[in-house]
Image (cartoon, rainbow, N blue to C red):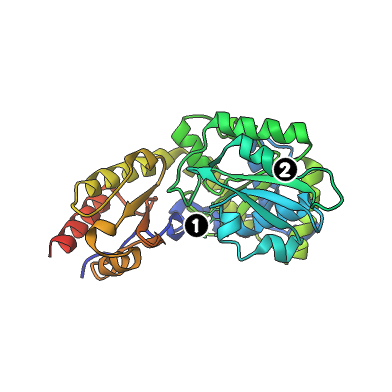
Amino acid sequence: MKKIIDLRSDTVTQPTPDMREAMARAEVGDDVYGEDPTINQLEALGAEMAGKEAAVFVPTGTMGNQVSIMAWTDRGDEIIVESNAHIFMYEAGGPAVLSGVQVRTVPGTRGAMDPDDVKAAIREDDLHCPRTSLICMENTHNRSGGCVLPLDNMKAVYELAKEEGIAVHLDGARVFNAAAALGVDVKQITQYTDSVQFCLSKGLCAPVGSLVAGPKEFIEKARRCRKILGGGMRQAGILAAAGIVALEKMTKRLAEDHEKARKLAQGLSGIPGLDIDMSTVQSNMVLVGTKGTGMDASGFASLMKSHRLLFNPSTQYKVRMVTHNDVGFDDIDEAIRRVKEALSA
Ligand code: TLP
């Protein structure tokens, strides 16, 4: 029986042996009382790495984004997000349900919003209009296939927001991938955002958890919002221990996943029927067009599933493949081989 090669997401990664050991040893306490030393250590480390005053540990990236939106806004406000943002596409309408805000979308190029479009979307101070209270960016940008927002674009949006007195939040689920791709310290990115949510459980391999980092007063509010959502955990230092390994060790190896993605993209792009825009292969994802095979994305994904190669449809004619710590370079060679074999049969 062939081994399963799982490229559905970097969320499928298993905690590393170092993580399991740290989890077993973790000193814990009741975090709702602020008494879990391992969580306190993780929050301090995350804040320091992101260049922010404070941080709060949350169970998921989705909760990280939602507590941030809740803490920055009032009911009836409007928030601006890029039209393919995770917050808009995949958080089950959370901003409307949880914060009572409406979402205004601005189209992006590979996830980057044009500052002029953002400016045009900001509401005037008029009794008829909702108040624009938050602008969200996403880096890396999932739906564009892991593209990295250019730093000057983030800077322009941030400066515009500051002129208008509007807060900026970054969905940095994979911000360490963005930093690795740009070859910069993550602070170079987070300097252009007031708050950031980053995931420990994706390419960084922790089993659970995200951090929200930002100004102290905002984090106090976010902590309260986390409690509202039922995210006040108790002896969760067991999870935070893996998060510390994720930040200290696993952030340093992400460039390797990017190399695997390039290798995969190069290998697949030579196969008749498949269409890949190499310029979008910037981090650990590859979007593969399937139209030329005569199959749509789900048809192609289910064909390859029968060859024990897993990935997800992204749009009607595009699948997304994600590289990570649990697929090796040899698995990439094998994945390319299986696709070739399946399409030539
Ligand atoms: N993304 C998942 C799916 O939800 C699509 C994936 O497999 O990529 N922001 C971004 C940019 C994300 O990609 C994700 C997860 C989240 C937030 C939410 O994180 P979780 O899954 O921890 O709630």
In the displayed structure, 41 sits above or below 34; it is: above
Point 18% across, 61% down: residue: 343
- As drawn, is 81 to the left or to the right of 276? right
Place of residue 117 in the rendered image (x, y in percent of width and height, measured from the top left): 62, 40
**Local secondary structure at mark 2:** loop
Mark 1 or mark 2, which is nearer the start of the sequence? 1
Please identify the quarter of the rendering in which residue 314 is found: bottom left
| Residue type indicated by callout 2 | Ile
Q: Are marks 2 and 1 in contact (CB under 8 Å)?
A: no
Image quadrant containing the N terminus: bottom left
Near-viewer residue (103 or 339): 103
**Local secondary structure at mark 1:** helix
Near-viewer residue (275 or 225): 275
Q: Which mark is residue 122?
A: 2
Looking at this rendering, what residue extends furthest in the left direction?
345
- As drawn, is 235 to the left or to the right of 21? right
Q: Which mark is residue 20?
A: 1
Near-viewer residue (24 or 190): 190
Place of residue 337 in the rendered image (x, y in percent of width and height, measured from the top left): 18, 55
Residue 44 visible at all: no
- As drawn, is 129 to the left or to the right of 26? right
Point 74% across, 33% down: residue: 162
Q: Which mark is residue 160?
A: none
Image quadrant containing the C terminus: bottom left
- As drawn, is 251 to the left or to the right of 72? left
Q: CA distance from mark 2 to mark 1?
A: 47 Å
Please identify the quarter of the rendering in which residue 75 is found: bottom right
Place of residue 6 in the rendered image (x, y in percent of width and height, measured from the top left): 34, 61
